[in-house]
Image: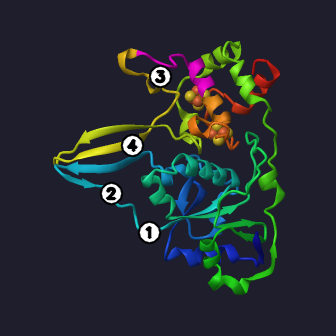
């Protein structure tokens, strides 16, 4: 992969070069201690810990979205902003999460329109105790990636950004990304498929389920959770709007169907369902893990339910 060394201050000049043409967002820690995707003007504003509480899925798959409106025979899809968004300082796990959402929403024009307008500038992160990055076979998707004093180019779009900054680059080479990005820090248990299949009756789920308060925080902060609900709304001006809003498999009503039947009426069943589908994928994506090991769910959980501890307990046949 094409790579260059860069000089001190290069990051700020890169930001400066983006500002006229892009809406530049990066993880920034607020005075309340929460990291959010915020507009930035200098690299020093970026949070070194990297991960925004609400991940970048909100940019391509907003929590509340109007997909279309209808007025008699006039069908309209709201046009997304024509200003491209540059997401800067994005940690590898969030880039891998976006790669997963790209698969989920491969045929979704609403997602794709925003995704094609999204410039990704990744950077290496500072892992937290809750992270458990799994090893990777492929590098994550990005246009540029900065680590220490080197940058990597991941697309023609990224290469084009460097034209005006070429004088600041040196030591070109075809280099892989730093090993810590692709090697991961922790192996997840093998034979997860069998472990989950055999775990239906384990007390583990009942006990973790008794602690869970079904708040849904773990799912809201998860960079790969994508459950949504659709509704139609009659607007005061006579139009009908089709809305798409984030939903949550921890909510009891998520699996409620006509006739009052519920596929997963208990919290224990919903926990097992979520963890299984995070680790083993879902539907056509079965076999591709949807967990990038970012640790957000463990940090957000008010009762300290930690997916890596649950997996370890499952692998060991023990309680967490
Ligand atoms: S399940 Fe938890 S650790 Fe895995 S990607 Fe989602 S928030 Fe991150
Ligand atoms: S954050 Fe914790 S308590 Fe809330 S739904 Fe998730 S596992 Fe349950």
3D distance between C-alphas at marks 4 and 2: 13 Å
Q: Which residue in the structure is indicated by mark 1?
A: 83
Contact (Cβ within 8 Å) of mark 3 with mark 4: no
**Which quadrant of the figure has residue 202?**
top right
Q: Earlier in the sequence, mark 3 or mark 1?
A: 1
Q: Earlier in the sequence, mark 3 or mark 4?
A: 4
Q: Secondary structure at mark 4?
A: strand
The numbered dot on residue 78 is 2
Q: Secondary structure at mark 1?
A: loop
Residue 234 included in the magenta stretch of the image: no
Label 2 CA crowd tier, 10 Å (few <14, some 14–19, many 20+): few
In this rendering, the answer to whether 236 lies above or below 198 is below
Q: Which residue in the structure is indicated by mark 4?
A: 244
Q: Earlier in the sequence, mark 3 or mark 2?
A: 2
* Residue 185 image point, x, y percent: 82, 45
For this rendering, which residue is in front, 102 or 303? 102
3D distance between C-alphas at marks 3 and 1: 39 Å
Q: Earlier in the sequence, mark 4 or mark 1?
A: 1
Q: Secondary structure at mark 3?
A: helix
- Of tags 4 and 1, the one toward the viewer is 4
Q: Which residue in the structure is indicated by mark 3?
A: 252
Label 1 CA crowd tier, 10 Å (few <14, some 14–19, many 20+): few
Does the closest atom of ligand 1 sit within 8 Å of the Cβ of label 1? no
């Amino acid at each position: 992969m094409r790579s260059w060394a860069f000089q001190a201050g290069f990051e700020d000049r890169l930001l400066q070069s983006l500002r006229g043409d892009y809406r530049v967002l990066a993880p920034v820690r607020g005075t309340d201690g929460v990291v959010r995707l915020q507009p930035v003007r200098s690299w020093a504003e970026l949070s070194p810990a990297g991960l925004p509480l609400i991940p970048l899925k909100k940019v391509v798959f907003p929590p509340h979205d109007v997909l279309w409106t209808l007025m008699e025979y006039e069908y309209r899809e709201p046009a997304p902003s024509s200003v491209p968004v540059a997401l800067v300082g994005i940690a590898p796990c969030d880039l891998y999460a976006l790669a997963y959402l790209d698969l989920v929403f491969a045929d979704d024009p609403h997602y794709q329109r925003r995704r094609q307008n999204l410039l990704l500038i990744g950077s290496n992160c500072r892992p937290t105790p809750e992270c458990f990055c799994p090893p990777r076979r492929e590098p994550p998707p990005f246009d540029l990636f900065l680590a220490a004093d080197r940058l990597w180019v991941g697309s023609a779009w990224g290469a084009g950004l460097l034209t005006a900054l070429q004088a600041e680059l040196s030591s070109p080479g075809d280099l892989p990304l730093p090993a810590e990005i692709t090697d991961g820090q922790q192996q997840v248990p093998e034979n997860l498929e069998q472990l989950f299949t055999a775990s239906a009756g384990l007390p583990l789920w009942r006990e973790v389920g008794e602690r869970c308060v079904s708040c849904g925080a773990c799912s809201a902060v998860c960079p790969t959770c994508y459950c949504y609900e659709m509704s139609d709304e009659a607007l005061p001006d006579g139009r009908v709007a089709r809305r798409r809003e984030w939903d949550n498999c921890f909510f009891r009503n998520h699996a409620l169907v006509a006739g009052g039947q519920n596929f997963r009426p208990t919290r224990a069943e919903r926990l097992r369902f979520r963890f299984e589908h995070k680790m083993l994928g879902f539907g056509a994506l079965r076999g591709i893990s949807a967990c990038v090991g970012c640790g957000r769910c463990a940090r957000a959980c008010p009762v300290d339910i930690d997916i890596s501890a649950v997996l370890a307990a499952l692998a060991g046949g023990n309680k967490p």
